[in-house]
Image: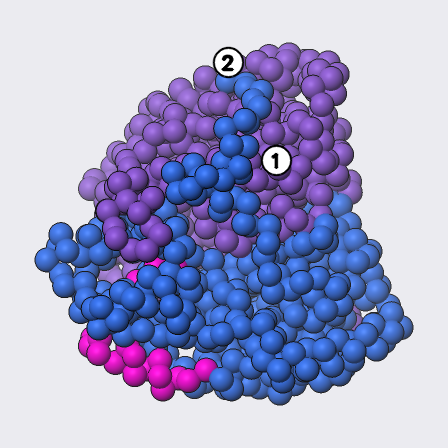
Chain colours: A purple, B blue
Amino acid sequence: MYVDLGNALGTRPGLDRDTLDRLDERVADAHGTIAAGREAEEHGYAALNLPETTDADAIRSAVSRFENPAAVLTVGIGGSALGAATVANALDSEVDAYFLDNVDPEWVTRKLDALPLDRTVVNVVSRSGTTAETLSNFLVVRDAMESAGVDWTDRTFVTTGEEGNLRELANKHDLPALDVPDGVPGRFSALSTVGLACAAIQGHDLDALLQGGADAMDSLSGSLYDSPGYAYGAVSYALARRGAGVNAMMPYAESLETFAEWFAQLWAESLGKDGVGQTPARALGATDQHSQLQLYRAGPNDKLVTLVRPREYEDRAIPETDLDGLSYLGGKSLGELLDAEFEATEASLKAAAVPNVRIELERVDERNLGELLYAMEAATVLYGELDNVSTFTQPAVEWGKKAARGLLGGGDFEEADAVQDKETLVVE
Amino acid sequence: MYVDLGNALGTRPGLDRDTLDRLDERVADAHGTIAAGREAEEHGYAALNLPETTDADAIRSAVSRFENPAAVLTVGIGGSALGAATVANALDSEVDAYFLDNVDPEWVTRKLDALPLDRTVVNVVSRSGTTAETLSNFLVVRDAMESAGVDWTDRTFVTTGEEGNLRELANKHDLPALDVPDGVPGRFSALSTVGLACAAIQGHDLDALLQGGADAMDSLSGSLYDSPGYAYGAVSYALARRGAGVNAMMPYAESLETFAEWFAQLWAESLGKDGVGQTPARALGATDQHSQLQLYRAGPNDKLVTLVRPREYEDRAIPETDLDGLSYLGGKSLGELLDAEFEATEASLKAAAVPNVRIELERVDERNLGELLYAMEAATVLYGELDNVSTFTQPAVEWGKKAARGLLGGGDFEEADAVQDKETLVVE
């Protein structure tokens, strides 16, 4: 992986090289903390050991009973879906991947109607076995399979903790069951059973995904200049502290659109606490040049723009044309156009003093994707250390969970009472 | 449409009712400017007349020659695609809608391979007829049709300005041609030929879409308390001025996911200039409760969260279950769960003093969608007036266009030279 920080220097908000060198001393300390946490397999830090601790054979073995599926349906939400979705949407496969990561009833119905249920493998993912959205969707899916005359116990497996509903269900019905690894928060679980079971069914190379992660892991050292992941995390932190409160993650590849969503969860949920945190904005090049670029260039000086692209891809020629003023495109390719726009956008941001970072992968394949995911996790952990936040927790979401549960009659919660007391000022 | 500002008051950054009343005096002035601009059909303001000026019959007539298509492919980018995509993704149709709004070569190839080219209608949308991405994609599509033995002149129409490449092409090959309306920037063109041709082919009710827009148009008056669109624009502006630099647009309906993208363009490109503007963040309920909510609640006090939902939808029951701790879900529905989460999230933001606005539609249909789109456009125009920006221009994107063109050999531009001079600081 290739990270170029050149356009993060000399901007507003901006850094200079001396600042980065001073920051590098703190990176050394933070790396010591991270290394010690990994060594002790502490909560969260353990995620950075996944390239070594994930057992690809166990994953392949668990799903081996499902022969020639047409589709794999992951029922999960947040970190229980986004890692798998990132891999699925980045890489081609003859097995279609679907995700039920929302409880919109019309949408759930449409998804189920589109699925060949008798040729679909269902993966239910919830560490606790009590996640309301996931378990509700599972009940709906199971019911739909029964209605369609499909034996759900033949086509379902679970990815869950050592105890709980899904573990009991697996034991009772002899379903394959994968263990959610200890000490790994959902948003850091892409390179574990949670993210890789779907990939295994799709026929992707789990070893290469893990090898990519291992390569990024091996680069971690006491200096940001040695590790692309640390470099990205340190610069993002420094820019955020200087006013870049928004990080626009803008891949120039449709295959990486879900990666930007995955990143947004990782970044927001890990770093957004105690009144700090950098807000991720999901963007897509070149499309969002015609949507967000005006704001990024000319709006408030509060942006870091992260530009990501693969260096190699299957290109497609633009036919020659006699259309007026377009002869310069004929004989070029869509890839050349996209690359020119990438570099033009990068330079245009720099010309407007908007900090930006370039990240390049060799190509979008298993190894490079594994490296990218790991590097971004390392970036997040380093940023959290530098900003002194509790990277691996998400306490602020509990309030709403209790309120929703109370509203549905699942117990007495004062949070649910607060919902009832809402004040209104209506215009209609 | 129903807008509830109750949770925008008494928050950090926050407003009180007196502030809103004082702001309402400025809304009266701004409305005067807007009304005068509409009356004179000035650039930009003319967009707010579209419910009256769009000729639905002309659109239906132009596409009437295409009988029983399986799919409609819109080739356009930014405002030439997002309005049509918003309608297409909100409403069910038996005619599939596809969009080529990016030049990623692998993705373009995959889209074309998936399309039944002999049963697809192609709509090429570019006011100037020179948009590099759109015209390149059109050349690729035309070539693919020829290779597949499909007469592209039988299956193509254009939506363009009075002159230029596409107009000439239409004249030469007798293609149906729709006029891009004068004075309507692309991002405000959803309720014109630009947004509605695709909808016509999909069999949607254009009259109802325009009627919804007309209803929102009729609500515009000199007070924010009379118009849902103005209410939303005024409150967003006031909160942005008090520190809410980010506007998280979070529909609780998968069908409105593209609406959030459309809004993001409208908001960013119209208001992001002169160092001001509120950054749109695209989110989706309930999914992003497991991704962005931690940041929204506990991160920096710089967010407005806009929660959107339909009141009516096709619900789906959650089957009864004996799974441990989940009996409270049995007998409920996915819709009840989603609604409980909506209200819980709203209250949880308020409890953390994060301002939020609730927008409700009766249901997601043509009329309500037309009203929503118009109201958001009115909100944008009002916000622009209050913030004294040039709402209808996008000057900051020109630099990059010139640079890209220069890089591709389309002329001498100093911007292209700046690209070559990039400084690097590489970590790999």
What whole-number distance in Å separates the C-alpha atoms at marks 2 and 1? 32 Å
Pointer 2 or 1: first along the chain? 2
Q: Residue at x 54, y 26 (%)?
A: B421
Residue on which the image places disc 2: A218
Q: Nearer the viewer, residue A98 or A75?
A: A98
Residue A403, horizontal then vertical, whole percent: 68, 59
- Magenta residues (range): B54-76
Q: Secondary structure at mark 2?
A: helix
Horizontal relation, residue B348 to residue A77: left or right: right
Q: Residues within 10 Å of mark 1 (few under 14, many from 20)?
A: many
| Residue B62 is inside the magenta segment | yes
Circle 2 marks a residue in which chain?
A: A
Residue at 24%, 47% (x, y): give it.
A320
Residue occupied by mark 1: A350
Give the percent coordinates (x, y) of residue B297. 72, 50
Q: Position of residue A188 (x, y in %)?
A: 54, 33
Within-10-Å neighbours for mark 2: few <14, some 14–19, many 20+: few
**Which quadrant of the figure has residue A30?**
top right
